[in-house]
Every structure is written in structure tokens, then in C-alpha cells.
């Protein structure tokens, strides 16, 4: 899943409403991540780092670096897939606000 997040980000970004681009609460998982593009790594190099993660915790730390913990404010929030998390969910934060099921369904 994390490989796909990085690989398909340009295609997803093309569908994002303009008002959601650059949103500090839904940052790019690759461009805004200090472990990936901000280190001048290519998408392929970033996916190699993902592949090297030995467990879920390492993966979450890599995908969601933050001061003193995880930063869930990325387009795809995987912080709740950790074994100790009750939710066990993946959250997509990049879409426009939805106040009905039809609007939300577009992003599923």
C-alpha cells in the first residue's frame, strides 16, 4: 500500500481540488516528507526505503515523521494501522470536505 501511495501520488494529485493542494493538514506523502523528496530521493529510492522497513512501526515512522512522535497530517494517514491502535484504519485526508455519503464515496 505504501509503495502505491508514493507511486500513484502524481495521479491522485491531479484529481485533488485546488483548495486542498498545499494544505498543512493533508501534506504530500512524498514531496512534503523529510525522509523522501526533501532528502532529494526519487520515488524509486523512497520505495526502496519503504521495502526495507522490518515492521509496521518502522513503516509508520518513515511515512509519518514528526517531532516527538508521528505526524498524521499527510494525505494518506497510516498511523492507525499500528498493532496497538484500536481503529486499524487508513485515512485519506486529501479530498474535499464531504457532508454526505455520495461525496465521500468518490474518494473511496
Image (spheres, rainbow, N blue to C red):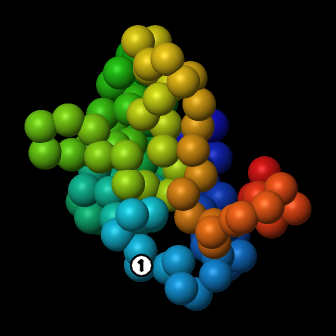
Q: Position of residue 13 (x, y in %)?
A: 61, 73
Residue that extends furthest to the front in the rendered view of this protein: 99
- Which element carries disc 1, helix, strand or loop? loop
In the rendered image, is residue 6 in sight?
no
Give the crowd class for mark 1: few <14, some 14-19, many >=20 residues within 10 Å.
few
- Measured from the top left, where is residue 1 in percent x and y? 63, 37
Q: Left or right of 61: which side holds 105?
A: right
The residue that disc 1 covers is: 22
In the rendered picture of this protein, how many numbered marks are placed on residues?
1
Residue 30, by quadrant, is bottom left
Residue 91, visible in the rendered structure:
yes
Q: Please tell me which residue lies in front, 47 or 29.
A: 29
- Residue 44 in the image, given as x and y percentages of width and height: 50, 51
Q: Quadrant of residue 84?
A: top left
In the picture, measured across the screen, residue 67 lies left or right of residue 31, that is left
Q: Residue at (64%, 47%) from the top-left corner?
A: 4
Residue 62 at x, y percent in the picture: 33, 38
Vertically, is 59 above or below 7? Answer: above
Is residue 91 found left or right of 27 in the rendered image? right
- Which residue is rendered at x = 38% and y = 54% of the image? 73
Q: Is residue 65 above or below residue 13?
A: above
Residue at image point 59% right, 31% down:
89
Q: Which sits in the foreground, 83 or 4?
A: 83
Amino acid at each position: 500500500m505504501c509503495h502505491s501511495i508514493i507511486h500513484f501520488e502524481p495521479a491522485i494529485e491531479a484529481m485533488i481540488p485546488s483548495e486542498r493542494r498545499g494544505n498543512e493538514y493533508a501534506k504530500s506523502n512524498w514531496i512534503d516528507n523529510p525522509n523522501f523528496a526533501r532528502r532529494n530521493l526519487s520515488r524509486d529510492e523512497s520505495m526502496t526505503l519503504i521495502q526495507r522497513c522490518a515492521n509496521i512501526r518502522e513503516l509508520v515512522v518513515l511515512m509519518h515523521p514528526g517531532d516527538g512522535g508521528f505526524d498524521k497530517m499527510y494525505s494518506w494517514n497510516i498511523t492507525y494501522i499500528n498493532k496497538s491502535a484500536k481503529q486499524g484504519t487508513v485515512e485519506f485526508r486529501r479530498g474535499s470536505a464531504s457532508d454526505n455519503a455520495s461525496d465521500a464515496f468518490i474518494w473511496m
